[in-house]
Amino acid sequence: MKQRLSQIGRIALLSLLVLGLHACSSLQPGGSSGYNQPVTINASCEQREEDGYYDKITVSVNQNVVQSLDWLSNPRQGKCLFQLKDFTQIATQPQADLQSRKNKKCHIYVWQDARFVTVSTNNCAKVCAVNDHVLPILLDPQTGGCSKVSR
């Protein structure tokens, strides 16, 4: 029961974080949020949660242009694999926006705020059936490793 509550809390917290950061996308460049800084990162992150949730991602981004992406997300309900070869980058501002070649409604977003580089999916259930269980990945912009949300 404690693990289930922990998972629900983690999902709620990360969902609020993602929604808040997307809301900031309407800010003009130079705003105080730090949201509009272009992403440049070479990241490799592998993490496993207590409840069995697992992510492994390698991503390379230069000035909001995604150069490589290989992301395996493994919620307990199944696996999702997102690879750059299956997406087309359609925007670099205000964040990197990758659109699925299989389903135009499916997007992967990459953006940076003052604390994290975030990689997130949106509307990808037709590309991966368990996508509604895939959580955003938070990367440390300095090290390229996994970041945790401070509580």
Image (tube, helix red, strand yellow):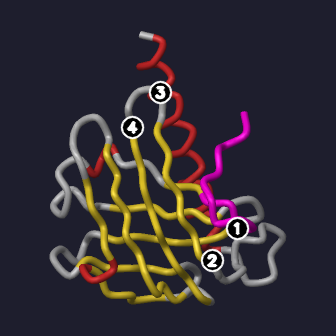
Mark 3 and mark 2 residues within 8 Å of each other at the beta carbon: no
Cα–Cα gap, marks 4 and 3: 7 Å
Position of the N terminus by quadrant: top left
Q: Which residue is mark 1?
A: 141
Q: Which residue occupies 20% across, 82% down?
A: 101
Picture quadrant of residue 34? bottom right
Alpha carbon distance from label 2 to label 4: 24 Å
Stretch in magenta:
139-151
Crowd rating for badge 3 (residues with CA inside 10 Å; few <14, some 14–19, many 20+): few
Which residue is pictured at 31% across the width and 73% down the height? Answer: 83
Please tell me which of labels 3 and 1 falls first in the chain: 3
In the drawing, what numbered circle is on residue 41?
2
Q: Are marks 2 and 1 in contact (CB under 8 Å)?
A: yes
User: Which amino acid, mark 1?
Assistant: Pro
Q: Are marks 2 and 4 in contact (CB under 8 Å)?
A: no
Kind of residue at badge 3? Glu
Disc 4 residue crowd, few under 14, some 14–19, many 20+, Cα 10 Å: some
Quick one: label 2 or label 1, which is nearer the N terminus?
A: 2
The CA span between labels 3 and 2 is 27 Å
Decide which of tag 2 and tag 4 comes sooner along the chain: 2
Q: Which residue has dot 4 on it?
A: 53
Q: Name the residue tied to disc 3.
A: 50
Outermost residue toward the top? Answer: 1
